[in-house]
Image (tube, grey):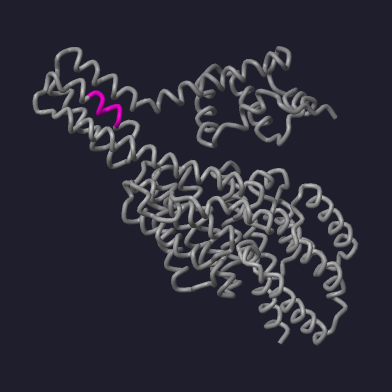
C-alpha cells in the first residue's frame, strides 16, 4: 500500500478548525458546479488519519475529474487558501476600525474621531483586549494636538498600564502553555520522574499569589493553571478550590473575554471534574449540571453550543451512574449516541472523545458488555497520543474486563500482551496500568467459573490492593477515567 507522510494538502486540511472546514464548504458550494467534486476530495482527505495516495485515487475515481490527481490536489489546495483569506477578511473589524479613525483624522473630523476612539476603548476594556486598546491610545495621542481636552500625560500613563497588563497576561499564558506541553504526553503526573518536572512551577512567583495577576483575564489564567497543576498531581482539595474560584470568576465577570462561552465551559467542566476527583457530592454536582444545561441553550455560536451539549451529556451520564439510576442512564446514552452520529466533526475533539468513553462506561456499568466493548475500541491510539495515552489505556483495560465477562478468554490473553507491548514502546506503561492489566489477566480471567463467595473474596482482595496502589497522590486522580474502587462496591452490592 502506497502511504506517504507529510502531504501538504492533507496537512492543510487537518490543520483547519471545524469552523474553518464548515466555512470552506459553504465557500466552495458558492463557486462553479464542479466544485462539488472537490468537496468530495476534501471529505475523503479529511477522513484519512494518514495520507494514502492509492486509496485517494480509488475513492475519487467515480467523480467528474478530467485531469491528473496532482493537478486536482493543487486546485483544491488553492481553493482552501482562497477560503481562508475570505474567512480572515470577516475577522478584520479591529483593523478596519483603526483605518476608519485614521480617515476621520485625515479629513479633519476630529470630534467624530475622538468619539469613535472613546467608544472603542470602552469596548476594548470590557473585553480586556489590551493590544487593541494600546493602538487606540496611540491614535488618541496623535489626536491630542487637535482636541485640547485630551491630556497627553494621562493617555501615556494609560498606555503604560495597558502594556503592563498585556505583558502580565502573556506571562500567564506562557506558563499555561509550558504546563500543557508537559501534560500533552500524559494527562496526569504518573511517576516521580514526571513529578520533578513540576518543581520549577512551584517556585514561580506568578502562581503562588493571585495578586500577581493584574487583570481579570490574567486572574482567570492563574486559576486555570492552578486547577490543572493540582489535578495533575492528584491534590484534590486544592484542585477543587481553584476550580470553584475559576468558575465564580467567569460567572460574575462574563465580560472578561469575547470567547466567554468557551472559557465558561472550561471553568464549569473543571469544577465538575474536581467534584468527581474529590468525592461525588450529589447536590452540588446536580446543581452545576442544571446550570450548564440552562447556559448551553443560551450560547449563540452553533459550534460552541455543540461542544457544550457534548460536555453536558458526559456529566449527566456520570451523575446517573453515581446515583445508580441505570434506566435513565441507558435512555440518555442512546440520545448521546445520536448526538455523536450527527456531530462527527465537533470543535474541541476531546469533548467528543470523552463523551464516547462515558457512553462505553455506561454500557459497561449496566452489563451491556458487547456494546461497551464496541465503544471502548473506538478510542484511537494515534488520536490519544496528542492528549496523553491515559484514556486509550483505560479504554483497553476496561475492554479486557468486558472480554472476561463475555468469556472471551483468548481475546483477553492476546490483547493484554499486545497492550503491554504497545504502551511500553510508547513509554506509557506506568505502574497503575501494569497493575490493572496483571490483575485482570491473573485474577479475573476465571471470573465466570467462580462461585459467589469466591467472587466476593476476589473483589475484596482487589479493593485492598487498590488502596495501596492509590496511596501515591498522583495516582488518585485516575478516577477521572474510571473509579475501580467505586466499581468494586457496585459488584459487591449486586452479589449480596
448 relative position to 69: left or right = right
Tag count in the figure?
0
Q: Is residue 105 magenta?
A: no
Q: Residue 365's spot in the image, x, y percent? A: 67, 69
In the foreground, 354 or 423: 423
The stretch of residues the image draws in magenta is: 134-139
The answer to which quarter of the image holds residue 257 is top left
Above or below, 291 against 41 in this view is below
Which quadrant would the C terminus be assigned to in this image? bottom right
- Residue drawn at point x = 33 percent, y = 27 percent: 94
Above or below, 221 against 373 in this view is above
The answer to which quarter of the image holds residue 33 is top right
Residue 92 visible from this viewpoint: yes
For the view shown, which residue lies furthest in the left direction? Answer: 148
- Residue drawn at point x = 16 percent, y = 26 percent: 114
- Residue drawn at point x = 46 percent, y = 63 percent: 289
- Residue drawn at point x = 72 percent, y = 60 percent: 371
Most frequent secondary structure within the magenta stretch: helix
In the foreground, 4 or 370: 4
In the foreground, 174 or 212: 212
477 relative position to 239: left or right = right
Which quadrant would the N terminus be assigned to in this image? top right
Q: Residue 151's spot in the image, x, y percent? A: 14, 29
Q: Residue 192's spot in the image, x, y percent? A: 68, 59
Residue 398 visible from this viewpoint: no
The answer to which quarter of the image holds residue 420 is bottom right
For the view shown, which residue lies furthest in the right direction? Answer: 410
Above or below, 19 against 235 in this view is above
Amino acid at each position: 500500500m502506497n502511504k506517504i507522510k507529510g502531504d501538504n494538502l492533507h496537512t492543510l486540511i487537518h490543520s483547519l478548525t471545524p469552523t474553518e472546514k464548515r466555512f470552506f464548504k459553504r465557500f466552495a458550494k458558492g463557486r462553479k458546479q464542479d466544485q462539488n467534486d472537490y468537496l468530495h476530495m476534501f471529505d475523503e482527505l479529511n477522513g484519512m488519519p494518514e495520507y494514502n495516495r492509492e486509496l485517494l485515487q480509488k475513492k475519487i475515481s467515480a467523480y467528474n475529474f478530467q485531469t491528473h490527481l496532482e493537478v486536482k490536489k493543487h486546485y483544491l489546495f488553492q481553493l482552501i487558501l482562497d477560503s481562508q483569506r475570505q474567512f480572515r477578511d470577516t475577522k478584520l473589524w479591529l483593523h478596519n476600525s483603526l483605518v476608519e479613525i485614521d480617515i476621520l483624522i485625515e479629513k479633519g473630523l476630529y470630534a467624530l474621531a475622538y468619539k469613535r476612539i472613546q467608544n472603542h476603548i470602552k469596548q476594548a476594556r470590557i473585553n480586556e483586549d489590551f493590544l487593541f486598546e494600546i493602538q487606540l491610545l496611540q491614535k488618541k495621542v496623535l489626536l491630542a494636538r487637535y482636541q485640547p481636552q485630551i491630556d497627553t500625560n494621562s493617555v501615556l500613563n494609560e498606555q503604560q498600564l495597558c502594556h503592563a497588563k498585556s505583558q502580565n497576561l502573556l506571562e500567564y499564558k506562557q506558563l499555561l502553555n509550558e504546563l500543557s506541553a508537559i501534560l500533552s504526553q500524559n494527562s496526569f503526573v504518573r511517576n516521580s520522574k514526571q513529578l520533578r518536572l513540576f518543581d520549577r512551577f512551584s517556585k514561580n512567583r506568578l502562581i503562588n499569589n493571585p495578586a500577581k495577576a493584574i487583570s481579570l483575564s490574567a486572574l482567570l489564567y492563574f486559576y486555570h493553571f492552578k486547577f490543572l497543576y493540582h489535578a495533575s498531581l492528584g491534590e484534590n482539595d486544592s484542585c477543587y478550590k481553584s476550580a470553584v474560584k475559576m468558575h465564580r470568576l467567569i460567572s460574575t465577570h462574563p465580560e472578561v473575554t469575547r470567547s466567554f462561552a468557551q472559557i465558561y465551559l472550561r471553568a464549569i467542566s473543571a469544577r465538575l471534574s474536581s467534584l468527581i476527583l474529590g468525592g461525588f457530592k450529589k447536590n452540588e454536582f446536580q446543581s452545576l449540571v442544571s446550570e450548564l444545561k440552562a447556559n448551553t441553550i443560551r450560547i449563540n455560536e452553533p459550534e460552541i453550543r455543540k461542544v457544550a451539549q457534548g460536555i453536558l451529556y458526559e456529566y449527566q451520564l456520570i451523575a446517573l451512574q453515581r446515583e445508580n439510576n441505570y434506566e435513565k442512564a441507558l435512555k440518555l446514552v442512546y440520545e448521546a449516541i445520536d448526538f455523536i452520529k450527527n456531530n462527527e466533526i465537533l470543535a474541541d475533539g476531546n469533548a467528543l472523545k470523552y463523551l464516547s468513553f462515558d457512553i462505553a462506561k455506561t454500557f459497561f456499568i449496566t452489563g451491556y458488555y458487547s456494546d461497551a466493548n464496541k465503544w471502548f475500541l473506538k478510542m484511537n491510539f494515534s488520536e490519544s497520543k496528542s492528549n496523553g495515552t491515559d484514556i486509550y489505556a483505560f479504554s483497553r483495560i476496561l475492554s479486557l474486563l468486558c472480554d472476561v465477562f463475555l468469556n472471551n478468554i483468548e481475546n483477553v490473553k492476546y490483547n493484554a500482551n499486545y497492550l503491554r507491548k504497545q504502551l511500553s514502546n510508547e513509554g506509557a506503561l506506568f505502574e497503575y496500568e501494569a497493575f490493572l492489566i496483571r490483575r485482570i489477566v491473573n485474577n479475573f480471567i476465571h471470573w465466570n467459573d467462580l462461585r459467589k463467595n469466591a467472587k466476593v473474596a476476589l473483589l475484596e482482595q482487589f479493593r485492598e490492593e487498590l488502596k495501596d496502589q492509590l496511596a501515591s497522590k498522583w495516582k488518585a486522580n485516575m478516577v477521572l477515567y474510571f473509579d475501580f474502587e467505586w466499581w468494586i462496591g457496585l459488584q459487591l452490592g449486586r452479589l449480596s
